[in-house]
Image (cartoon, rainbow, N blue to C red):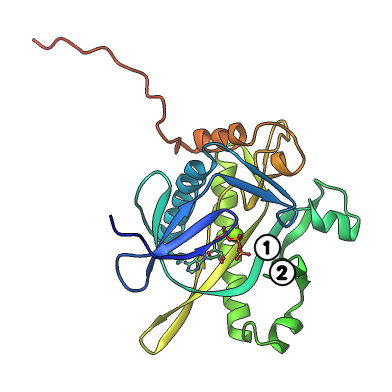
Amino acid sequence: MARRNKIYEGKAKILYEGPEPGTLVQYFKDDATAFNAEKHDVIDGKGVLNNRLSEYFMSGLNNIGVPTHFIRRLNMREQLIRAVEIIPLEVVVRNVAAGSISKRLGIEEGTALPRPIVEFYFKDDKLGDPLVSEEHILAFGWATHQDLDDMVALALRVNDFMSGVMLGVGIKLVDFKIEIGRVYDGDFQRLIVADEISPDSCRLWDMKTGKKLDKDVFRRDLGNLSDAYTEVARRLGVMPNAATPMTKPKLMN
Ligand SMILES: Nc1ncnc2c1ncn2[C@@H]1O[C@H](COP(=O)(O)OP(=O)(O)OP(=O)(O)O)[C@@H](O)[C@H]1O
Ligand SMILES: [Mg+2]
């Protein structure tokens, strides 16, 4: 068997060379990390769930005209994606205060924000992915004015889609992070949603009970992470190997 060409191994995923130029295979691992990898564990089945959930969200976005890197799922842990040039920024959208914004600005967790707030963090593990302003982004050439406009527009469309999908299954989309990449089409370039959209990169709270159904379960030791992700997948109807009730064979006459 020929060995595949591994392009990159990160904390949660591995990228392999894809079958055609301009494609990659994204493999979802079971590893969970938090606080810049200070906390690490292996959660059985997390990769399978995130592969399914990212497929579900990204293909939903593709269907409503929000471009993403997702092409198709290949198997339990892998999907075929378009290779992009990742913009070195994490784009965060917040609907409700939680996590770092609560700490930094002293806003109590759970406070509804007056409007969705878009933030940019510089992707650099050594620096702990610091919050940056548009001034930093422009001055250091990480993105142009046009890119910034496009990134905000993309992020807000993802927010509207994801908020609606989650609302439909009784879950509040508190915040999420996306990565955005550049693709080239002849003389043109455009930005598309890349990386993953999963409970690893969102805050999801049950609307009735407030129960957390995202990576905070792991960060804050609140219980079983795989149970929380399975709950999200079950509500959305994307449970892998969903236990379909066995129906008795019917006698035809
Ligand atoms: N379509 C794509 N084309 C190229 N690179 C991508 C694409 N989608 C995601 N990536 C990159 O692949 C890597 C995914 O691996 P993983 O999420 O495990 O990384 P990580 O450990 O979080 O590190 P990083 O800080 O680089 O995100 C990330 O570096 C991400 O930016
Ligand atoms: Mg990552």
Where is residue 57 drawn, in percent x and y? 49, 52
Q: Looking at the picture, how far across and down is residue 239, in whole percent? A: 45, 35
Please indicate whether residue 108 sits to the left or right of residue 189 in the image.
right
* Left or right: 80, with 173 as reference point: left
| Residue assigned mark 2 | 121
Tag count: 2
**At numbered mark 1, what does the secondary structure look like: helix, strand or loop?**
strand
Q: Residues within 10 Å of mark 1 (few under 14, many from 20)?
A: many
- Relative depth, front residue between 209 and 179: 179
State which quarter of the image contains the C terminus: top left
Which x, y percent locates residue 227?
59, 31
Kindly identify which numbered label has been placed on residue 108: none
Q: Residue at x 71, y 69 (%)?
A: 121
Position of residue 89 relative to residue 1, above or below, is below
Foreground pick, 124 / 172: 124
Q: Position of residue 251 (x, y in %)?
A: 15, 9
Q: Are marks 2 and 1 in contact (CB under 8 Å)?
A: yes
Task: Give the image quadrant in which the ligand numbered 1 is located.
Answer: bottom right
Which label sits on residue 92? 1
Q: Quadrant of residue 242?
A: top left
Q: Residue at x 52, y 34 (%)?
A: 235
Q: Residue at image x 76%, y 77%? A: 133
Q: Is residue 180 shown above or below 250?
A: below
Secondary structure beneath dot 2 equals strand
Residue closest to the eye, 122 or 38: 38
Which amino acid type corresponds to the residue marked 1 in the rendered image?
Val
Side (left or right) of 243 relative to 162: left
Q: Earlier in the sequence, mark 2 or mark 1?
A: 1
Q: Residues within 10 Å of mark 2 (few under 14, many from 20)?
A: some
